Image: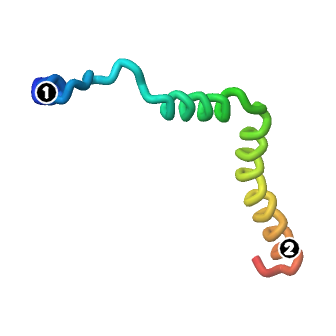
Amino acid sequence: MRDKRDLRAKVQGVEYPPQDPPRFWLVQSQTAGSAIFGGPFWLPLVAILTGALVPAVYSLVLYKQLERRGEL
């Protein structure tokens, strides 16, 4: 498979694999990297904790209400 790609690239006059990636991929990689690693650390942490704690608190409140009414 690799030989066919190399042969096709030679015929078309294209390097395979490309040695110089297009500008789009560089910008995309830099944007993704800064969003993941360069942003504020606390923001994803808050999102994860909120997603985990909100259902737990809601469930506890609902349980206590049912317990007070004697419906358990």
Q: Amino acid at mark 1?
A: Val
Q: Quadrant of residue 15?
A: top left
* Number of on-image labels: 2
Residue found at the very far right of the displayed protein: 68
Q: Residue at x 77, y 50 (%)?
A: 50
Residue 46 drawn above or below residue 32? below
Task: From the top left corner, tell me how far across and down residue 41 is, in percent.
Answer: 76, 31
Q: Please indicate whether residue 67 sits to the left or right of residue 15 in the image.
A: right
Instruction: State the SS at label 2.
Output: helix
Image quadrant in which the N terminus is located: top left
Front residue of 21/63: it is 21
Q: Residue at x 83, y 73 (%)?
A: 67
Instruction: State the SS at label 1.
Output: helix
Image quadrant in which the C terminus is located: bottom right
**Which of the numbered marks, if any, corresponds to residue 65?**
2
Q: Residue at x 67, y 35 (%)?
A: 35
Residue where numbered disc 1 is placed: 11
Give the label, 2 or 1, closer to the camera.
1
Task: From the top left corner, tell me how far across and down residue 7 is, in percent.
Answer: 11, 25
Front residue of 52/38: it is 38
Q: CA distance from mark 2 to mark 1?
A: 75 Å
**Which of the numbered marks, if any, corresponds to residue 3?**
none
Q: Amino acid at mark 2?
A: Gln
- Callout 1 environment at 10 Å: few (<14), some (14 to 19), or many (20+)? few
Residue 67 drawn above or below residue 54? below
Residue 37 drawn above or below residue 49? above
Q: Quadrant of residue 33?
A: top right
